[in-house]
Amino acid sequence: MTSTLTVGALSAEPGTKTRGTVPADLGTLTVDIPLTLVNGVHPGPRVVITAGVHGGEFTGVDAATRLAALLEPGEVHGQVVVCPVANPPAVYQGRLGVSPVDGVNINRVFPGDPDGGPTERLAAWLFTNLLDGADAYVDLHSGGIDEVLTDFVGYRLTGDPALDAKTAGMAGALGIEDVIFGMNADGGNSHAAAARRGVPAILVETGRLGERDPETARRLVAGLYGVLDRLGSLDTQHHDPQSAVREWVWAAGVTAETSGLWYPEFTVGDDVTEGQVIGHVIDPADGQEHKVHTPATGRIFYGMHGLTVAAGTELAAIAAPAPHDH
């Protein structure tokens, strides 16, 4: 028999499902975090699924909400915690990766700081209340309103063979062909911070340009059932067996050296060669044109679609085929 599943004042006894919100004190404001707690009858892992870490990324929010409605305690082994809107200020009051509260990208500051600014406190709240005690973690992201993207799953290598193998299994169970891993677990991304704590964690990127396509969300829900199957969280098989994947490793990011108007000359999924021109940034004041070159050879997995960019804006991200001996 499983134990009571509790987050804040919200709880679910074994064999029950509870939906509601839990307040998170961010110092200068309090936000309500929506949660669905599914506590199975049979023992099993605790799986945490978040979406809405960034504003303007709708597919993950939609899929997490659909999954929360579908999951029933009778089919769950262990516990599933679904948080469809992890960052309410960014989701409801903003449409970009940074929070309108303090201009901070929460996915650069995990695991957060309980004594920091509002977004750092939110990151700490999510890790303390959701990730502590988790056996697996899935963070759902999407191409934002100004971002083109080809679907992929990401995770970080930790050097722990058992942990890395379990994470790779989760990544392969989603039914998404391209899997990109980082060679270490450094940085403030949610899945990297979770990996550093020994939690197998994956980043899922689906959809583009802030689209709210129902079929894309339904495919993602099916993929999430595949992950839950893989983890032993479900009573019955919902998903095809592990699918073949193509493995990549992050090679380079391309950033704007100056502010201006961005004219890309690539499509996501394009293969590029180091030094290749992939677009131009034009200064609207004097018309001066700045060529943008790719610093590495590989494939472009996501890029900036918006016309206006500031210096330092990420224009594209490139991954290269993974070495066979990783």
Image: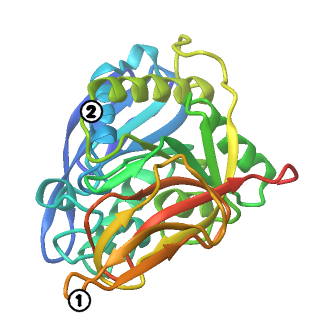
Which of 202 and 182 lies nearest the eye of the viewer? 182
**How far across and down, in percent of the image, does residue 171 sit?**
61, 39
Residue type marked 2: Thr
**How far across and down, in percent of the image, does residue 210 sit?**
26, 46
Position of 206 relative to 72 (above/below)? below
Of the numbered discs 2 and 1, the one sitting upstream in the chain is: 2
**Mark sitting on residue 286:** 1
- Counting the numbered discs, the total is 2
Image quadrant in which you'd find residue 314: bottom left
| Residue occupying image coordinates x 36% and y 29% | 216
Q: CA distance from mark 2 to mark 1?
A: 48 Å
The local secondary structure at tag 2 comes to helix
Is residue 114 among what the camera can see?
no
Q: Is residue 94 left or right of residue 273?
A: left
Which of 232 and 101 lies nearest the eye of the viewer? 101
**How far across and down, in percent of the image, does residue 179 sit?**
62, 44
| Residue occupying image coordinates x 38% and y 50% | 148
| Residue occupying image coordinates x 69% and y 39% | 246
Position of 206 relative to 109 (above/below)? above
| Label 2 sits on residue | 65
Q: Is residue 228 left or right of residue 144?
A: right
Image quadrant in which you'd find residue 297: bottom right
Give the residue at the far right of this rendering. 325
